[in-house]
Amino acid sequence: MQAAMVLFALFLVTPAVAQAPVFSDEGTLSSDTGHVLVQWQSDEPVSLSIESKADPAGEKTLYAGKAQAYFLSGLANGEYTLRLKGESGLSATPLSLTVAHQSLSQALWFTLIGVIITLAIIVTILKGARDD
């Protein structure tokens, strides 16, 4: 009985083994808008950093704390690497992010189509109201 109490006491004071943080998404994230929600699981505070493949020496810390997600916005076209490191020094497998914004010409065409449809609806409503 006494041995069991000693083992139990040792179990209580032995620190838990920290596990490496893990990104919720695996592989490569992609965005055509320049923003993305990055999520992860971790038992400890983490730091999230980003590095542009165009500037490998420019790694920048985005967040440090206990949250499990970070909304990243304002990114230019390009390829990025996201790194997540726990307070204990353990790191998640890096996550790749590709940003390729929609083209301006495509956006203008969609706007033109929207204007045409809106005008057609207005004309139809006005013409229908006059016939009554």
Image (cartoon, rainbow, N blue to C red):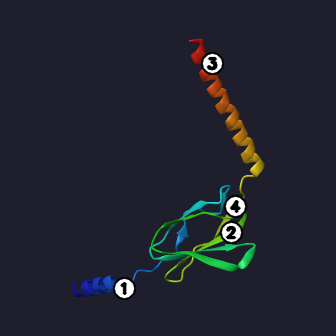
- The answer to whether residue 20 of the structure is visible from this angle is no
**Amino acid type shown at disc 2:** Tyr
Q: Is residue 125 left or right of residue 110?
A: left
Q: CA distance from mark 3 to mark 4?
A: 45 Å
Question: What distance separates the C-alpha of mark 1 from that of mark 4?
Answer: 45 Å
SS at badge 2: strand
Q: Position of residue 52 (x, y in %)?
A: 70, 72
Residue 116 visible within the image: yes
- Check contact, mark 3 vs mark 4: CB within 8 A: no
Separation (CA) of disc 4 from disc 2 = 8 Å
Q: Mark 1 to mark 3: distance in Å?
A: 80 Å
What amino acid is at disc 1?
Thr
Front residue of 132/33: it is: 132
Please rate how many residues cluster around mark 4, counting C-alpha atoms within 10 Å: few if below 14, some from 14 to 19, many from 20.
Answer: some
Q: Are marks 1 and 4 in contact (CB under 8 Å)?
A: no
Q: Which residue is mark 2?
A: 80
In this view, the residue in front, 56 or 95, is: 56
Q: Which residue position holds label 3?
A: 127
The quarter of the picture where residue 25 lies is bottom right
Above/below status of 104 relative to 63: above
* Pointer 2 or 3: first along the chain: 2
N-terminal label among 2 and 1: 1
- Helix, strand or loop at label 4? It is strand
Q: In the displayed image of the protein, which residue is found farthest to the left?
A: 1
Residue pointed to by mark 1: 14
Which mark's residue is nearer the viewer, 3 or 4? 3
The mark that comes first in sequence, 1 or 3, is 1
The N terminus lies in which quarter of the figure?
Answer: bottom left
Please name the residue that numbered disc 4 is placed on. Answer: 99
